[in-house]
Structure formats: C-alpha cells, structure tokens
Amino acid sequence: MSGKIAITVTVNGTTYEREVEPRLLLVQLLREELHLTGTHIGCDTTYCGACTILMDGEPVKSCTVLAVQADGCELRTVEGLEQNGELHPLQVAFSEHHGLQCGFCTPGMLMSAVHLLETNPHPGPAEIRKGIQGNLCRCTGYKNIFTAIAAASAKIQAGN
Amino acid sequence: MYPAPFKYHRASSVDQAIAMLGQIGECARVLAGGQSLLPMLKLRFDEPTDLVDIGRITGLDRIESNAAGATIGALATHRKILLSPLAQAIPIIADCAAGIADNQVRSRGTIGGSVASGDPSCDWPVLLHTLDATIRCHGRNGERTLDINGFVADLYQTVLQPGELVTGILFSVPGSGCGGAYCAFKRCAPAYPTVSVGVQLSLSGGAVKKARIALGSSAPTPIRAPAAEAELEGAAITAERIGRAADAAVAAASPYPDRRGSAAFKSQLVATLVRRAIGIAQRRANGETVKNSHEYY
C-alpha cells in the first residue's frame, strides 16, 4: 500500500470519500479537504486540545491522528453541534456565561464538554475540571468555561 | 506540521504485521494509537520510510483476568483499561490509567505503545515493574516473553529486535495482604510526569514479605530500587524504615535537569513520592480503600 489511500469518513452525519496522502493529519483532512474550519489547530504538539473532535464517540486531538486512521470512523466536530438552527445547550451556555474571550480554544472546549456531558450528564465540580483537563485556554477564561458547562448540565437536566 | 512522507501499510493480523515489518526492514515503524509516535514524526525527530498500522488488529485490545493472572492486550487504550473490571480490582491500575496524559490522549494511547516507546517518563512501565510483569512479543522467530525489568535498555530503546512487536502485558493479580500505589507528580494533565513512583507491598503477619519500588522520569530508563525494597522487606513498616527506603530510592535515581525541574528538585520528589506511595500501599494492603491519582503543581 503506497501513494494515496482511499478513505471514507462520516462527519456530522455526512459521508465523505477522499484519497489522501498517508501523512495527512485528521485535522488537516477536516480543514483543508472538507473545508470544515471550525476545528482549530493550536499547538500542533498534542498539548492544547484546540483540535479536539469526537471520533467514534471518544474525544481525540485531531492533530495527533492520521486521516488514514480515521478511515471508517464516525466523526463529530463543532459544526455538528447546532441542530435545525438551534444551538447546542453548551453553545448557548458558553454565550450566556461569557465562556470565551478570543474564542480560539472554544471548539475544542465544546467538544470535550460534549463528551463529558454525554458520558456523565451531572458532573460535579471536580469532574467538570477533569473533563476539560486536556484543553488549554490562554485567555485564562477557565472560570467562565466551568460555569458555562455547569449551567448547560443543569439546563439539559431541567429539559429532560 | 506534516510528518515527512512515508508509505502506509495496514496489518489485519499480528502475522501480517510481522511479515510487513520483515519485508520493509529497519526503516519501518509500528503505528498503534500514535500518541507517542505521531508527535515524534511531526517534529521530524524520526523519519521512517514506512508505517505499519497495527491499530485495527482484532482482539489485540482484550483485557483478561483469571486465576493464572491478568493479560492486557497491547492495543488496550488507557481509557479502556481505566474502565475495565481489572482497574476496579487492582487500585494501582486505576491510579495509573486515570492520570495518563489527558482525556483525549487516553482515547487513543495504548499500553503497548507506552511500553514499546522506551520513554522513561511513560507511566505504565513504572507500574509494571511493581507487578513483576512480563511483556509478550511476537517476531519472525515466534513468540517470546520478556521481563519488564530490563525491557527498556536505554533512553527510548527497548530490547525488542527489529521487526518484533509487543502484543501483550502479563502479570499475577495481587492477592489479599497486597497493596500498591502509583504516585505521579506533573505540571499539567497533557504533560509527562516530572517524577513518578510505584510501590507494591505484600504484607504477612504485620511484616513486609515482598516490596517493589519503581521510579519513572528519574533515570534514562524506568528503574527498580532494590536497595529501597530491601529496607522494607522482612520487618514491620516503621517511619524510620520508610525514611531509609526513601533515601535509598534517591540514591538509585539519577534524574537529569530539564524544564520540568532541576535534578535536586526531582530527587526531593522521589523521596516525597516514595514515602507517600508506601503509606497508601500499606493502607490498601490492610484492606482500606484509598483514593489516589496523579497530582499537578
């Protein structure tokens, strides 16, 4: 198997087939081939978590996954959070509680928070902090991010 | 950052992976979760001509435990291990798995990669020293099982032969009277530990029958500290013995200064973490439930 590799990925419910160079990173597939630029490249060294997406339901740093490794996988990115024109409760909460300043880390923060609330709908304070441990915010906005996630959790709980 | 170009090969079985590695030769690297390898390739610290992807080999992530012992497949991710019944049964496994890097890395990173990378900062090899684990490997000449002690031969170097794969980790499940603790001190979640210490004790009639003390990020390889173990074995645990074990562990360590801290700071951490881990291991050996995980500073 050399040269370009044919892969199929499903992103936010849409299936894409592409032929990619083996060295193409998953984040570059999303941004440059599929033009889904909501997922950001931050540190590019597996630290900051700005590129976090969900791969078969688990959070991954898409700068540290090859596109060929995602072949056959179901991916969710920040673009998939809004449904039928309605923002995801986490997006609403980030907006209401000023959970962002420059916004660069926000897509990754949101995807980590989505995974947290989907696996643990009622996280305690320590669990929320641990849920975003792999995401760095350089505006030091952690306090409001924490508040937003807690508010979204409460809102989802009340809505059910 | 793009890695340098390489050819990609996807193996669907261990035998196929070994055949591919044999055919390509020493310029091939094994790709599993990629959490150690891909950062190396992106920084171009390594430029292999070929990657053999073993990540989809069915069954290689299995976690099994019976009277004969436990086996963790090389492809078991840190998260899968954390959520396994094995981690519930052996608290030291949960201590370790819960704090390896962050949520995202735990989704992809594997125990086989942690062992095969030969990185002295990786968490699993330190813990596996305390359990006298063995490493199952497959290569051209068939299967062999190697002691974890000595498996990492030097900085980022293991005793694996070219074309040989780590396929599983084996160890005996600690019985009653046994307790362990894994204590790691790190700057933040995504970082490797500045220093980590694993302790496993087997108590009998109030005395320590067997002790294992292992250190990570404290030498060019993960190491055991036999002189520290000897300070505890054959007698009851006292504050004085704990102090002597901590001193002996510091003497066994040869930490190098880097941006995580000076050598003196790391030596101090070795002493502190050895004391702390012995305390937790002792309480657990006595049947107490003790919460423990990586600490950040």
Image (spheres, rainbow, N blue to C red):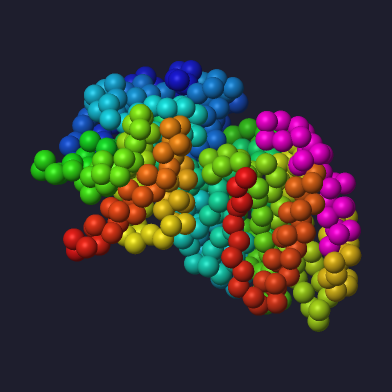
Q: Which residues are magenta?
A: B242-266
Front position in the image: B66 or A14: A14
From the viewer's perspective, tell me whether residue A89 is left or right of residue B223.
Answer: left
Q: Is residue B120 left or right of residue A115?
A: right
Please tell me which residue is depicted at 39% across the width and 48% down the height of the picture. A146
Residue under the point 70% across and 56% down: B198
The quarter of the picture where residue A96 lies is top left
Instruction: Establish if B58 lies above or below A78.
Output: below
Q: Nearer the viewer, residue B14 or B108?
A: B108
B171 or A33, which lies in front? Answer: A33
Q: Provide residue A37's location: percent of width, then percent of height.
A: 27, 26
Residue furthest to the left: A84
Residue B181: image location, x then y, percent: 67, 61
Residue B255 visible, this orientation: yes
In this rendering, does residue A6 appear at all? no
In x, y percent, where is residue B50?
49, 25
* Main secondary structure found in the magenta portion: helix
Residue at position x 76%, y 53% in the image = B272
* Residue for point 84% across, 62% down: B242
Q: Is residue B262 magenta?
A: yes
Q: Is residue B54 left or right of residue B176?
A: left
The verdict on residue A151 being magenta is: no
